[in-house]
Amino acid sequence: DGKSLKMQSPSGDFSFQMGGRIEADFAHYNQDRQKLGDGTDMRRARLYAQGTLYRDWDWKFEYEFADNSTSSTNSKGITDAYLRYKGFAPLLITAGNFKQPFGLEQMMSAHNLTFTERALSQTFVPGRGIGIGVQGSGAHWSLAGAAAGERPEGDVAAEGDEGWNLSARGTFAPFVDPGRVLHFGASAWRHEPQDSGNALRWRSKPESNVTGVFLVDTGQLTGVDDFLASAAEAAGVWGPLSLQAEYMRANLTRAKARDASFDGWYAQASWFLTGETRPYKVADGIFDRVTPKASVGLGGWGAWEVAARLSDVDLTDAGIVGGQQRDLTLALNWYLAPNLRLMLDYVRVLELDRPGNLADDDEPSSLTGRLHVDF
Amino acid sequence: DGKSLKMQSPSGDFSFQMGGRIEADFAHYNQDRQKLGDGTDMRRARLYAQGTLYRDWDWKFEYEFADNSTSSTNSKGITDAYLRYKGFAPLLITAGNFKQPFGLEQMMSAHNLTFTERALSQTFVPGRGIGIGVQGSGAHWSLAGAAAGERPEGDVAAEGDEGWNLSARGTFAPFVDPGRVLHFGASAWRHEPQDSGNALRWRSKPESNVTGVFLVDTGQLTGVDDFLASAAEAAGVWGPLSLQAEYMRANLTRAKARDASFDGWYAQASWFLTGETRPYKVADGIFDRVTPKASVGLGGWGAWEVAARLSDVDLTDAGIVGGQQRDLTLALNWYLAPNLRLMLDYVRVLELDRPGNLADDDEPSSLTGRLHVDF
Amino acid sequence: DGKSLKMQSPSGDFSFQMGGRIEADFAHYNQDRQKLGDGTDMRRARLYAQGTLYRDWDWKFEYEFADNSTSSTNSKGITDAYLRYKGFAPLLITAGNFKQPFGLEQMMSAHNLTFTERALSQTFVPGRGIGIGVQGSGAHWSLAGAAAGERPEGDVAAEGDEGWNLSARGTFAPFVDPGRVLHFGASAWRHEPQDSGNALRWRSKPESNVTGVFLVDTGQLTGVDDFLASAAEAAGVWGPLSLQAEYMRANLTRAKARDASFDGWYAQASWFLTGETRPYKVADGIFDRVTPKASVGLGGWGAWEVAARLSDVDLTDAGIVGGQQRDLTLALNWYLAPNLRLMLDYVRVLELDRPGNLADDDEPSSLTGRLHVDF
């Protein structure tokens, strides 16, 4: 499809492919109590190489060149670096650095998300780690599990042991026809911190990444023995209409303080004015790339989509005042071609309770534009 | 041409190309008052990928892997990361991170520069930024304009707004025949700092990059409301002879101090002993890559060029004592092949006035060698 | 062979090739006196591009994306970035950033090493630098020499001159038949520090890289005028059996303190249970990649190898108490395919003498696993 460079041996046993993406952001903030910082940002700038060796072995290496040091789950560094054995397909075994299975938005590529940023509840997902994963799927379901240490850049106290992670996600989709999808999913993630402070801080930006401000933030929590995060998801597609919602929760066990629990959720609806529908990929239990009926430059005007999202996160419990935030997002997306997209998001903070903090009652709004190209 | 890897779809609507460059430097300093630090350096080490999508969309992603943290306009990070629409050609619309139009040397690739480093006046150019640009050209002219924020690594004070930039450049070339070129150009750049300290420091290295010393330097200037930089350029080619000169100026408006203005210029001449001539690219208003008449390894001795440059910068005004410096540079270039070059520059600081600073009257000279290969 | 992407012009005068490698580690430490930090690590994650220009010019650019900031000879940054002229082959001239010739293990790619980490004596090798090298070879010998400054990331005191290096290595192999190799080699490396503190610290990790602890460490030595390192190597292959040993030594001259000398050595044996033999590359005087007789996925079970190593380093002399350490390593390697390997190393610190330091008498053991894929 000309989308990226791909070379294949005649037998198909060997292949080599390269590609990447560029996402450039612009944001203007209608500030309330704190400065948020208008400006521009390179949100993602990635190159990848991937291929197949000896028919049964897939590998992938991807690097994020954009430096978003203030972003919680995304920063300069190795993203994917793994080897996958598919000799027992549909059972796949993956080893290396990869995304731990948890949640719907998290498992989807940013290529295919409806909004420029994932919802406030994104703070509860495990991200990537070095470890081993297993996944399988059927005609209507998928199941994935992983055991992992920390990312290559894991923030481990000097020579302490790394934290360990166990995570799993299952999905079930009674209908998987184009234009008629119903999807349910559940995930769990258990983390033992060991000597690592990693993953023991929950915080969210106001669903716009140019600013470096996290309006809600628990700070780094100490004395946490372990925690269990869980998530439930449901989504449906009826022609151009798509509905999607997730609920996530984290329960902490602490030796010298009360146990605490945080949660968050979002619910969103989107409509393709030009009649496209979101495709579904049952093997991974996620939504896939939208292809406009008529791309710009090939005689058409691309695909146009409007969307709205309500999202919420509550990081206040048991004496920890991380804050509770609720946002409304309105979005307009123009898909010029399958891999070219212009996005515009208006986010309004509806409510922010964080007593004693500068951010308490801070209710800014933002306008974020994005240029997305992947190749 | 074997220069880099390029794949194209049969229709030409899609393409994918990869390449890069390596520039390794060696420098010896004949020091005067300050240590400059003999040594070696990787000046540039870049890889890029670029391509065409759906006929009308060009994209490019390039990364600089060499870490010249002390260099003013060049350091590790994303260089080009943009999408360009050419459906209205010769009108081109570019969005992403790219070079803002300003000046002749600045708009030329380092592949094609006569000396190892741009002249002292290089401190007045805007560099790259994230924004939108438009350019057009005719048989004898080019015009380009851009509005941009800051680079991905922009140095913005904590959550302050980014500075904004408007820049434009026009060129006119009454003669554009091979071996007979006359070129004129003018540029302007307006910068509003907002909360950013970026671009509010003017400084120059002594036209050799291995050292980390900037002999002239205004330091970081505070309280600048905005500034306007302007530049004029003229160049001509008569067979193997090439003449080129630029003048640049920056005018600062300051709320609580006197307005200031700095300027700089250079004039250079080069002669190809082996008879080559510098090619001109009218659409961008720049000089292009020199191809030796007979490359080494293909039966020839490559192209040999001698050159001289006089350059000057004055960063002292209105109570700011950045210094005034004048340099003479003599160069010998050996083009082994179109993309293989050995360069040798002798730079003599003729004059340096910076009262009260260690660098006052410092008049060192340097010998800088470079190996250049691009692929 | 499908191993990587390679494009060639019909004449063979031009080529372009891309590839890379991923090495993911896991380690568990049976700690004694100090915490060593169990966990996971991305040991190497490299991409390279290389090619040929105008028949006689080879270039290579490789970057290490894995961030092992605590590792002594390996960290994020440019590895190879050079241009090589082969018009006088077998005499090769190399300029740019490349490995300075010294030692057997050091000159071998990590692809082809028997253990996950090089031996304790690895602290005596020069690593990479920017400079010029010459090498030649015959049917039974190789000879290489280089003059170089420091790596692009060289740790030079502010604007001091870089340290300079001269190194050379010669090898002689009376037998070079497959399955019957006898190899001898000798190396020397002279370093003048100038104003640089680089290379004036000797230290070793306990042959497992996940930990950041160096059990032996001289600290940064000041007042060193220059030093001379030398090495002797011997190796032999008899069918599936391979023996290999190296001895290295560094002699320091110090202006205001007694001269000092450190040394180290290792001896190792390996046996291929499945009958493979280590191939030898006489032009570089190193061992090459092992190809399993029957790869996994192509009807076989790959190659299996067991190995043992005794290694020693002594960094205590003339009032410097860097410590003396002796390790025993047992290894099991599974070569699934020529470029896919699983490795498991058990390392036992047999002896550690470092009076007055926390590490004195620290005798931990470690279990390190590695997944290796190169493409």
Image (cartoon, coloured by chain):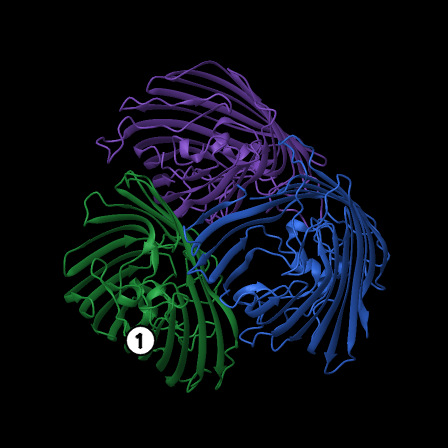
Chain colours: A purple, B green, C blue
Q: Amino acid at mark 1?
A: Thr
The reply, left or right, for residue A263 in relation to residue A365 is right
Which of the pair A202/B176 is nearer the observer? B176
Specify whether residue B248 is in view.
yes
Q: Is residue A263 above or below residue C124?
A: above
Residue at mark 1 = B274
Assign the N terminus of chain A to one quadrant of the image. top left
Q: How many marks?
A: 1
Q: Position of residue A304 (x, y in %)?
A: 28, 29
The reply, left or right, for residue C203 in relation to residue A85 is right
Residue name at image x 65 percent, y 46 percent: A156
Assign the C terminus of chain A to one quadrant of the image. top left
Q: Position of residue C363 (x, y in %)?
A: 84, 52
Where disc 1 sits, the SS reads loop
Which of the pair A176/B315 is nearer the observer? A176
As drawn, the residue found furthest toward the top would be: A174
Which of the pair A72/C277 is nearer the observer? C277
Q: Is residue B119 above or below residue A238?
A: below
Residue name at image x 72 percent, y 36 percent: A256
Q: Is residue C370 above or below residue B219?
A: above
Which of the pair A330/B119 is nearer the observer? B119
Q: Position of residue C245 (x, y in %)?
A: 78, 59
Q: Position of residue C322 (x, y in %)?
A: 78, 66
The reply, left or right, for residue B254 in relation to residue B33 is left
Q: Residues within 10 Å of mark 1 (few under 14, many from 20)?
A: some
In which chain is the residue bearing label 1?
A: B
Specify whether residue A252 is in view.
no
Residue name at image x 14 percent, y 61 percent: B140
Question: Toward which corner of the image does residue C41 lie, by quadrant?
Answer: top right
